[in-house]
Image (tube, rainbow, N blue to C red):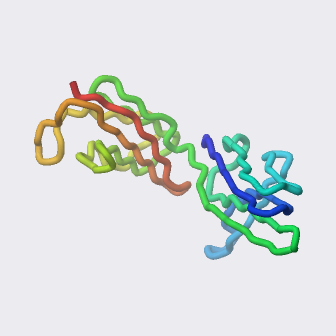
Amino acid sequence: MVDEEQCHRLVALGQLADDLERVGRGSGADDAVVVRVPRAQVALDSGARNPGTYTFKWNGAGAAEGRWTFRVTARDDLGRSSAVERPFSLNSTLQGLSVSGSKVTAQLARPASLTIRLERSGTVLRTLLKSQENAGPTSVTWDGRLDGGLRASRGSYVVRAVATNQVGTAELTATIRRR
């Protein structure tokens, strides 16, 4: 599942349409197929709007995993059109990340290449795990040390798990504390 929030701003009176498309593969290796999501499945914004900022939230419920594109198109009162696209992926491979003391557990829904890193202020301090893993829980215990064997100072750190497979890449973070 994903909690996707999109925000767009209309600067002049006009018509607005939001659209979600799923990009899949056709029968040939290079055949791109675009599948439109029926509005009955995903309620999106459309119609005449005054200038302003408009937001919609979508949690991915009922949508297939894979690559998607969020597209906003607008036409102002003078008939000029503009469009913005943002690609994203729906991927539930990495279903959970938990920390209990010094034990970090990632839950995979399907096999994936899994990397678990320890970070602080956006800097990777240590890679705790980097391997191909099967579906199910994968655990690693942090010994309180950084790369090079130095003991970590007390405080909070970010644990980042990244799972990559044929669906794409999924990422979760959790906090771990060194006391």
- Residue 165 percent coordinates (x, y): 48, 54
Is residue 153 shown above or below 21?
A: above
- Residue 146 percent coordinates (x, y): 18, 42
Q: Between 45 and 90, which is closer to the camera in this rendering?
A: 45
Residue 28 in the figure: left or right of residue 141: right
Quarter that holds the N terminus:
top right
- Residue 46 percent coordinates (x, y): 84, 54
- Residue 54 percent coordinates (x, y): 73, 50
Identity of the residue drawn at 37% across and 36% down: 138
Q: Between 56 and 146, which is closer to the camera in this rendering?
A: 56
Identity of the residue drawn at 43% across and 42% down: 134
**Occupied quadrant, residue 174:** top left
Quarter that holds the C terminus:
top left
Residue 39 in the figure: left or right of residue 34: right
Number of labels in the image equals 0
Q: Between 89 and 135, which is closer to the camera in this rendering?
A: 89
Is residue 136 shown above or below 40?
A: above
Identity of the residue drawn at 75% across and 71% down: 82
